[in-house]
Structure formats: C-alpha cells, structure tokens
Amino acid sequence: METSPVRVRFAPSPTGRMHLGSGRTALYNYLLAKRTGGKFILRIEDTDTKRTVPGAEQELIDGLRWLGVDFDEGPDIGGPYGPYRQSERKEIYQQYARELVEKGHAYPCFCTPERLEKMRQDQQKRKEPPHYDGNCRRLGQADAAARVAAGEKHVIRFKMPREGSTVARDLLRGDITIENKNIDDYILVKSDGFALYHLAAMVDDHLMKITHVIRGSEWLGTFPLHVNIIRAFGWEEPVFIHLSVFLKPSGKGKMSKREAADALKDGYSIFIKDLKDLGYIPEGVLNWIVLMGWGVAEGDVLTLPEMIEKFDINHLNPSPAAINFTKLDHFTGTHIRMLTDADLAGRIRPFFEAAGYTVNDEILNKLTPLIKERIVTLDEAVEMAGFFFKEDVVPALEDLIAKGLTHEQSAEAARQILSTLEALPDLRHETAEPALRALVEQTGLGAGQVFGILRVAVTGQRVSPPLFESMEIIGREKSLARMARAVAMYQSNS
C-alpha cells in the first residue's frame, strides 16, 4: 500500500460531458490522495480548441463538487503550480519542445497536408499500417532551424528510437514491451503552436510534481511513447495506472450514443449531471462506481470516508467492468436510508418545487420518514408524495372501483368509510385504523378493498406511503373532504 503523500491529477478534456468513466478516474485519484495525506489536482487539458465544448469545463467542476470529490488545486481555485488550463501554458510547452529538438529527440516537420495524404494512400495500397515515413527526420538540424527561422509552417515531431524496444511499466498490468520501430514519430506541437497531449501532459505532470498517473485505458496505446518522452528529458517517471474499461450492461462493447439515449428513457444515464437530475444521490453513485474496478466485495456499502480508509491501488482490477444499473438503484436506495430525515427532506425539496409544488416545511418534515424506506431516487418522492401539497386530488373513477367489487358495491363501501371517519374525533393513526378495521369486520369486505378505496380517495393514487400516517399529516378536514368528493364521484357516475 502506498503510504507516502502523493500528488495525483484528474486531467479531463472539456470536449464532452462528464461520464461515469471520468467520475471513477477522478474518484480513484481523490481516494489515493486522501488515503496518503497527499494532494488531488484538477487540470483542464483544453489544447484541442476545435473540439472544446462550451460549458463542458464547468460541468466537470460541478460534477466533481456534487460527487464530493473536492480538488486541492485547480483552474477556479488556483495553486502553486498553475495555470491549470493547458491553453494558458502554450509558451511552457514550446520551451520544452525546443529543448527536445536541441537534444536531438524531436524535429520540425514541414510536410504539407497534401504530401501526408499521398503518403497515407500509398501505405494503404501497400497494406502497411499508417505511419509517418520520416521524410523531415532526415533533415540536418541547421537546415531545419533555418527553415523555422524563415517562418516556414511546421509541426514538431518526437524522434522515436528506431532500434530496440521500449518497456513501459503499468502497476496493474506489469511490463508492457513494444518494438520501437512500431512506435510512430508522433506530433508533439501543432503548426498553430499548441502542444498535443503527448507533450503537454508529460510536461505538466513533471512540473506539477505528479507522483501517480491514474488514467483511462485508452492511453495504453501511446503509453510507450509517453515514457520515451519522459526519458528523453531525463525525468523521474510517475507510477502509471491504466484503469479498466466500462462495458455496456450486456458486457459486450462500450456504450454507444444510441444505447446511452435508450438508458435515459428508462431513467438511467452514464452522465454525472443526468444522474443528479434523475434523483440519484452522490453517495450512491460513488459507491456504485468505486466498486467497478476495485477488488473489494461488490456487496460492500461504503461511505466516502470508508472508501478512503480501505482504498489501495494494488487492489485495482484491469479487467473490463460492465455497467449494472440495478446496482446503482441498490446503492442509491441504501444510502438514502442512511441519511437523516432532515438531510433527506432538504434533498427532496427541490424536486417537489421543480414539479410546481409550494412546499410546506412542517408537512415535508412529517412525510419524509414515511417515504424514506420506499424510494430509490429523490425524484420518486414527487410521484409518491406530491398529494400532500395539493389542495385537492381528483382520482380516476376506475381506480375507485375496488378489486372484486362492482361500481355500486364500491360506492356503498365508500359511503360507509366516510360515515365511519366522520364519527371519529380525530384522524390520528391510532384512532382511524382500529375504526376502519372494525368496518372491514362488519361489512365482510377485504381490508385491501376498504383501504384501497380510502387510499385512492385521499391520495389520488393506488400506491402511497402508509395510509393512516398519511391521513394524519393531511389532516381531518382535508381527508374528509377528499373522501366526500369520492362519494360524490360515484353518485355522479352511477
């Protein structure tokens, strides 16, 4: 287990929405930092200006804060190693690119797009894998420098060794060996002067004193390139950890845009903001994603402090992990029941307000314990308990017909229910339930039939929180008025 204080970073590109993979990468970095008393840094890798999506950076920051994965240094709070946006570090990368050129580890490439396209076409005809043919690699340094000084348009490419092999070590996978001749001379700096990830991330990790790089497995393909760049500078290599990939629920392949859209129709999403809007709570989401790739028992219900206490990078698993939304429901429901009633009330309030209800605090605080055991997401509170904030409810007539009874039999039962309730001094649970159970005995009807009619009349729905506790919150006057309305509905539709 790592014990020395680490410096780790979550370094997303603001080119799309924050998804589960991003959330898990950030979480693992955060847990390692907190476990060792280290620092967790947010760095925005926004050098690909053409693909940058407006608002994406803020969604990333908001997503981290909603999850409770707070960073110690970042673009909006600063820190000793800023700036924390790569677009603001252009000159830094150019300086290090020049150093690589001067040391003979990189070179200017003046090939035009037209030449590169013809080169690719020729390689395809020869059935060769696409790669740069090294045309400008053969230029002398003085000649290349003169052309750069003359203002000729160029990129900077890394000069990969052509002999031997590169051994790159991943903590989870061990040594990864690749023949150097199979690694391309990748572009480090584009013709517009902006560095690509391969250079920028390595430079930033060095300057920001990053000790562990926990990132997605999509970087495994260029991992040998990255360690070659680090070694060309003579820097100490951080510990690299490439996480497992997320597979769609079937376990076959990654989620497509269409499948993500279909999941949303079913009330699920792979995007963090959507999960928040759908009523999932961060504690449940964290518990769900932390176990997808971590070798602890899947049934473990963990709070964030418990995750920090147990986290060990040596127990991470490189095997692909299928997204299981059933487990998301399980963990969210479990963590909802772990909240205090006051905390839960505060969290469901915005969902009632978004649905157009004027929320009465006294009623909200009374209803919260009734639904706490019955909801899986916060938004379910609205469907289950919205009737508490209505002046009146209008049940569907067909719902007022009890199972096994005719319209007339149901109407008669409703009149007897109303008469029984009107005779009571109050509608407290301990007063109303015995009286209604006595009516069940007296009429020979089933409890489900009597209570079902009462439930629909008072709440407007077939499923509700506990009936008699609900009536007590609604109050005697309003409950009787709703029951009387139901009786009138039977009569007007007979």
Image (cartoon, grey):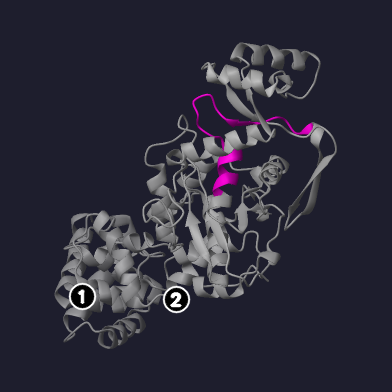
Instruction: Give the mark count.
Output: 2
Is residue 187 highlighted in magenta?
Answer: yes
* Horizontal and vertical percent position of residue 174: 78, 55
Q: Which residue is mark 1?
A: 362
Between residues 225 and 265, which one lies in front from this camera angle? 225
* Horizontal and vertical percent position of residue 133: 74, 20
Q: Secondary structure at mark 1?
A: helix
Regarding residue 466, the answer to whether it shows in the image is no
The disc label shown at residue 400, or none: none
* Horizontal and vertical percent position of residue 439: 30, 82
Cα–Cα gap, marks 1 and 2: 22 Å
* Horizontal and vertical percent position of residue 343: 34, 73
Regarding residue 6, the answer to whether it shows in the image is yes
Is residue 203 highlighted in magenta?
Answer: yes
Left or right of 4, for residue 304: left
Mark 2: give few (<14), some (14-19) or many (20+) Cα within 10 Å: some
Callout 1–callout 2 Cβ contact below 8 Å = no
Between residues 486 and 119, which one lies in front from this camera angle? 119
The residue range painted magenta reads: 182-204
Between disc 1 and disc 2, the foreground one is 2
The disc label shown at residue 338, or none: 2
Q: What amino acid is found at the position of numbered circle 1 in the picture?
A: Glu
